[in-house]
Image (tube, rainbow, N blue to C red):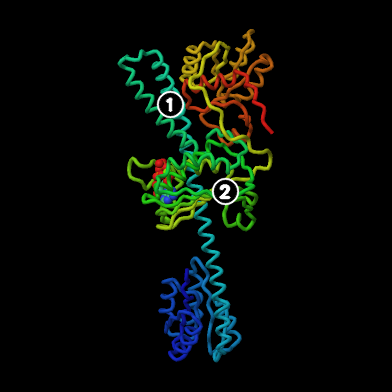
Amino acid sequence: MQTAPPVVLVIEDDALVADMLRTMLSRAGYTVEIAADGVTGLARIAAGGVDLVLLDLLLPEINGLELCQRVRERESDVYLPIIVLTGQVRADQRQAAFAAGADDFLTKPFEREELLARVQVWVRARQRMQALHARLLHEQEQLRRSQRLEALGQLAGGVAHDFNNLLTVITGFSELVLQRLGATDPPRSYLEEITKAGERASALTRQLLAFSRRQVLEPEVLDLNAVVTDAEQMLRRVIDDAVELHTHLSPDLWPVKADRGQIDQVILNLAVNARDAMPRGGRLTIETANVELDESYAQRHAPVRPGSYVRLTASDTGMGMTPDVQAHIFEPFFTTKAAGKGTGLGLATVYGIVKQSGGYIWVYSEPEHGTTFKIYLPRELEGAPAATSAPARPRSAPGGTETILVVEDDPQIRALVRGVLDASGYTVLEAQRGDEAIRLGEEHADPIHLLLTDVVLPGMSGRDLAHQLAARHPELRALFMSGYTDQVVVEQGLVEPRAPFLQKPFTPEGLRRKLREVLDPAPPQPPSSP
Ligand SMILES: Nc1ncnc2c1ncn2[C@@H]1O[C@H](COP(=O)(O)OP(=O)(O)OP(=O)(O)O)[C@@H](O)[C@H]1O
Ligand SMILES: [Mg+2]
């Protein structure tokens, strides 16, 4: 990009001197403007775009000293250097000029080289200040954006949390009723519609939770190359034939720690967006690389912490975005797509997942020149990536005969869980609060096989409850459920990293399956071949 030449404003009432300066400075590559009196000069400065002022002291209307003072009083964003150029050589004039705000002082007659050198020094200083100022503005804007996303996240998280309980109840009871209806009962189709709507609402709620970084993640040590390779098949099906998919996977990639399903979601959302940006075809490139972000990078990209990262890049050759669009893409429900085509939750979800995984995401895009998303995930220093493929899940989960203690303060959820467990053959004990559950545990002489508890209970955490109950019932296993975990909850270890967890909203089927997962001892692992 070519930058415009610096603008020098000469404020000088002697036309001959002004002309000479114009010639001299133009030849040196500056754009020169002349003002023949102080008032015109001030007006020109106020209009903006002047990089340096050459100022005569003896001027009609407003003299040079006063003009200096006025410029300094009104100074806005970036400092404007002023060089005084005068025939007066009295020492007190020089001091007065500096006191009024001048930066430099040259007396006529002056040497051409001397003048050009001073002009160059001050223009350069001005340019440096401009660059610093631009950086400051950029950082402020970034900060403002991330604060806005933070606030939106709080709001979305709160809504999603309350919706989770409601949806669990709506879809859960619908399913229980459905199970009791014959295949041809008339209300069946109504209930199926309710269930479907509930599932759509759950999907939305999950995206909001992801955005607000309150999902319960199941982080594991991952090789992103393997994740991308495994996702390729699925991506090819998602993007059109007219879009070529390329992957450049850097060998010896460092491991990262993240939730595999969530990283799949990130890749998928980026790919779908890229597809939509290339309706006439193009190229989607996914790359991985190890990168070190140093102190100077971190300074320019607040709030990045310097260190080792694995970078995942997705670039397309599509329609790109204007800066205005870019400013909003991570906000939930921001979409430029036609009604019914996009909900505007794709990138909000990506943002939340990346942030919750301790990473960063940047976008680079220009209209008609494609888009690149760069995601940085911190390098994981402990542990090696696990095998990649997830075990297949059985289609329908069986019930059981064990005794389960359910602790949940929301009466509707409790009633739902009881309904599901009763119907599946379990013996159910119920409590609303932690202390009540402990009392029940004391009084119950027979084994309690499982504690199914909310993570946060009135007055105590689910985890503490599990510990206390285990003293009396060593056979007891625990399964935690929650609509979300606050960052605080995770950080304070209220949910242990590997503790069995059931995310709300859940379906009766999901609950039954999870119960068996926790209650049945894991089958022996097949011996691994060397
Ligand atoms: N690769 C891209 N190229 C051009 N514009 C993009 C790209 N990715 C995202 N955008 C812009 O960002 C907006 C928000 O994207 P986001 O994925 O959050 O929502 P959406 O795709 O519109 O809807 P949803 O993902 O919920 O179906 C898009 O509507 C589009 O304007
Ligand atoms: Mg999208």
Could you say whether the residue bearing mark 2 is in a helix, strand or loop? strand
Residue furthest left in the image: 186
Judged by depth in the image, the label closer to the viewer, 1 or 2, is 2
Q: Which residue is rendered at x = 46% and y = 19% of the image?
A: 412
Could you say whether the residue bearing mark 1 is in a helix, strand or loop? helix
Instruction: Tell me, yes or no, whether the two marked residues, 1 and 2, touch with CB atoms within 8 Å.
Output: no
Indicate whether 491 appears above or below 276.
above
Query: Residue 297 lies in what quarter of the image?
Result: bottom right
Q: Residues within 10 Å of mark 1 (few under 14, many from 20)?
A: many
Q: What is the CA distance from the residue labelled 1 to the residue labelled 2? A: 41 Å
Residue 387 visible in the picture: yes
Indicate whether 484 appears above or below 227.
above
Query: Which quarter of the rendered picture does the C terminus lie within?
Result: top right
Mark number displayed over residue 167: 1
Q: Residues within 10 Å of mark 2 (few under 14, many from 20)?
A: some
- Residue pointed to by mark 2: 249
Q: Give amino acid for label 1.
A: Leu
Q: Position of residue 18 (x, y in %)?
A: 45, 87
Position of residue 35 in the picture relative to residue 264 (left or right): left
| Cβ of mark 2 under 8 A from ligand 1 | no
Q: Nearer the viewer, residue 406 or 375?
A: 375
Q: Give amino acid for label 2.
A: Leu
Q: Position of residue 371 (x, y in %)?
A: 46, 53
Q: Nearer the viewer, residue 279 or 120?
A: 279
Q: Which residue is rendered at x = 62% and y = 25% of the image?
A: 463
